[in-house]
Image (tube, rainbow, N blue to C red):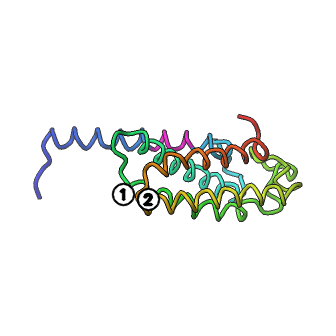
Amino acid sequence: MSVPSLADLTVRARLGLTAVTLALLVAGCGQQAGETETAEASAPPIVVERQEGYKALGASFKLINDQLKSGSPDMAQIAPAAERMHDLAQQIPNWFPAGSGPQDGVKTDALETVWTNPEGFAAAQQRLVGATTELQQLAAAGDVAGLQAHVRVVGASCGGCHDNFRAEQ
């Protein structure tokens, strides 16, 4: 077993800091897409699950947008992120069971309208599923121009839910 050089250790330390920085950025992104970042240890597991789900959804959308804004989008990164967004969008209804809202004393950015207007919430969620289905198809086809146009549709779908079912940030 060889002893790592100082240069190797320096590179490893920088990579470790980069990973920590990236993790913090992703967590911050999730705060825009989900609930409060400071989930209390006493938060019900489903609230933690939905917070993590929204963080992952936001991080995937950010990755896609960043790639599309770069000079040469990498479809090998975009396609799995689009698939992850689609998978997560389909899970959203499971993240909001009865007893997990503010009317139940749970600290959450989800508005009571998620539970008092379930038809409206379901319709908004289905718009996101539809938008991410097309996003996934465009990514699988490698259609960069189509993706660049369609991310606005996905963003509007996210915003529609934020406007109606999430506390203002």
* Disc 1 crowd, CA 10 A, few/some/many (<14, 14-19, 20+): few
Q: Residue at x 55, y 41 (%)?
A: 29
Image quarter hosting the C terminus:
top right
Q: Nearer the viewer, residue 130 or 92?
A: 130
Q: Residue at x 43, y 42 (%)?
A: 22
Residue 140 is a magenta residue? no
Q: Which residue is mark 2?
A: 79
Amino acid beneath label 1: Ala
- Indicate the quadrant where residue 17 lies: top left
Is 36 placed left or right of 119 in the picture? Answer: left
Q: Nearer the viewer, residue 89 or 169?
A: 89
Assess whether mark 2 and mark 1 are in contact (beta carbons under 8 angstroms).
Answer: yes
Q: Nearer the viewer, residue 158 or 108?
A: 158
Q: Residue 47, how many percent across, how many down?
A: 70, 55
How far apart, in angstroms, are the residues tagged by discs 1 and 2?
A: 6 Å
Q: Residue at x 62, y 51 (%)?
A: 54
Q: Residue 6, how many percent across, how many down?
A: 15, 39
Q: Residue 76, which numbered label?
A: 1
Q: Residue 1, how many percent across, how many down?
A: 11, 59
Q: Nearer the viewer, residue 159 or 146?
A: 146
Q: Residue at x 56, y 60 (%)?
A: 134
- The stretch of residues the image draws in magenta is 23-29
